[in-house]
Image (tube, rainbow, N blue to C red):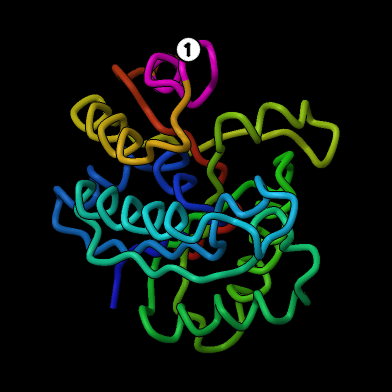
Amino acid sequence: MADVLVVAAHPDDEVLGCGASIARWTDAGRSVHIAILGEGITSRSDRREEADRELLDKLHTNARAAGELLGAEGVTLFSLPDNRFDTVPLLDVVKIVERLLAEHKPVDVYTHHAGDLNIDHGVVHRAVLTATRPVAGQCVRNLCTFEVPSSSEWAFGDIAKPFSPNVFVGVGDTLSRKCDAMACYETEARAFPHPRSPQALEAIARRWGSVAGVAAAEAFELVRAVR
């Protein structure tokens, strides 16, 4: 069981979206499980089957290392096709999330914002929203979405309503661990001014911190909460 379940599309999304918050939650004694539904990076090859399997295995090893650094109780990796989630029946994705909910029974779930540029993020959002619908026996009380730098803002609000956070987690003490966890992803980190650079990630956290009145923050958009 886990207090918090983070459902991400690709290895590194979990760090970009809420890495510093995961570290804060686990430091406070909360149990966090990370689920990554997509295999990652195979879309960089012309054909999925031509992708470098050794590089893919290393990416998954890096995902587990990043989760361990953040204090997560575990990282579950699935193998949906990178940047091709729209070729998978939505029901199949929903069933993956339903199995995760049945296994971990989280109170809080964090996942992608609906309006991200990346197609996989949008599919995961829809699947999580479906799997966590508030029917009898639903364990999830709070559902929030996170932004992913280089995807949420690059949609420019043209796919769905732009990310508009209304929940903030102060991460002044754990921001450095987010950057360290991102450094585990050698193939995903980028140099400034790319949004996935350490400098940009810190600037984003400082900006949201200024909005919330703290030194640094990660921002979330609340979908629903049951009190």
Q: Residue at x 38, y 61 (%)?
A: 34
Answer whether residue 204 is magenta in the image: yes
Quadrant containing the N terminus in the rendered view: bottom left
Residue 176 image position (x, y, % from top left): 23, 27
Question: What kind of residue is marked 1?
Answer: Phe
In the image shown, does 131 or 92 lie closer to the viewer? Answer: 92
Q: Is mark 1 on a helix, strand or loop?
A: loop
Question: Circle 1 sits on which residue?
Answer: 192
Name which residue lies at 54% across and 61% down.
Answer: 39
Return the x and y of residue 201 as percentages of the image width and height: 42, 23
Q: In this view, does 196 lie above or below 94?
A: above
Examine the rendered structure and indicate whether residue 44 appears above or below residue 226: above
Q: In this view, does 112 lie to the left or right of 27?
A: right
Residue 177, horizontal then vertical, whole percent = 23, 34
Q: Which span of residues is magenta-colored? A: 191-205
Asked if residue 71 is positioned above or below residue 2 in the image, the reply reads above
Residue 127 located within the stretch drawn in magenta? no
In what quadrant of the picture does the C terminus appear?
bottom left
